[in-house]
Image: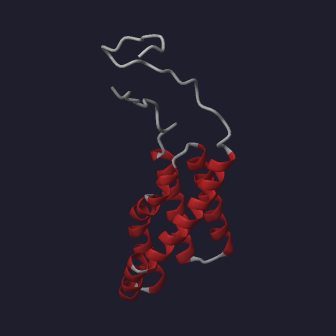
């Protein structure tokens, strides 16, 4: 009879909902300020906040979350970006430009976010990969007797 191995362990170290939402709100602020009053300071803050989230995701071994991050960011930034565009460029022109920015332009923003967050998260994951988890415990399946190595 072939043996069966079942791996039971906690796959993640912590939830990432709160840091992801905080990052999305911070990125929404950076993007809205970038539409209303473009400056290089906003870009720097965007990179700082994204770097912090990437490091957090890498350390917590949640690198796959970088694929969801742009969607969460879009949910928080879409409406404020539309309003900021209408304030900056006028009601009708701002609505059209904001709509294009939110739909078409977001593909580029999302791609940049995935690439940057992914690189930082993978780097943080590689740096922290040397640490070991707790001891491994082997448990025989129910109903099976241990024969001390004899078949």
Front residue (pair 4, 67): 4
| Placement of 136 over or under 94, stated as above or below | above
Question: Residue 23, image x and y in percent?
Answer: 53, 55
Task: Give me the residue at 54% from left, 24% from top.
Answer: 136
Q: How many marks?
A: 0
Front residue (pair 19, 42): 19
Front residue (pair 6, 89): 6
| Placement of 127 over or under 37, stated as above or below | above
- Quarter of the rendering occupied by the C terminus: top left
Task: Give me the residue at 42% from left, 59% from top.
Answer: 72
Question: Residue 142, image x and y in percent?
Answer: 32, 16
In this picture, residue 144 sits left or right of residue 67: left
Residue 121 lies in what quarter of the image? bottom right
- Quarter of the rendering occupied by the N terminus: top left
| Placement of 71 over or under 3, stated as above or below | below
Colour basis: secondary structure
Residue closest to the far front: 151
| Placement of 89 over or under 134, stated as above or below | below
Question: Residue 53, image x and y in percent?
Answer: 58, 53
Question: Residue 79, image x and y in percent?
Answer: 38, 68
Residue closest to the far left: 143
In this picture, residue 61 sits left or right of residue 81: right
Task: Give me the residue at 47% from left, 53% from top.
Answer: 65
């Amino acid at each position: 009879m072939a043996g069966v191995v079942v791996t039971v362990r906690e796959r993640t170290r912590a939830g990432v909902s709160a840091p992801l939402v905080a990052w999305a709100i911070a990125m929404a602020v950076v993007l809205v300020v970038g539409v209303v009053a473009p400056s290089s300071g906003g870009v720097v803050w965007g990179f700082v906040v994204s770097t912090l989230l990437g490091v957090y995701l890498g350390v917590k071994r949640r690198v796959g979350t970088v694929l969801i991050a742009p969607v969460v960011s879009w949910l928080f930034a879409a409406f404020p970006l539309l309003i900021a565009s209408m304030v900056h460029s006028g009601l009708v022109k701002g609505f059209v430009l904001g709509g294009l920015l939110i739909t078409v332009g977001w593909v580029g923003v999302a791609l940049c976010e995935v690439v940057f967050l992914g690189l930082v998260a993978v780097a943080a994951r590689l740096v922290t990969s040397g640490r070991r988890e707790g001891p491994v415990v082997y448990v025989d399946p129910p109903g099976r007797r241990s024969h001390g190595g004899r078949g």
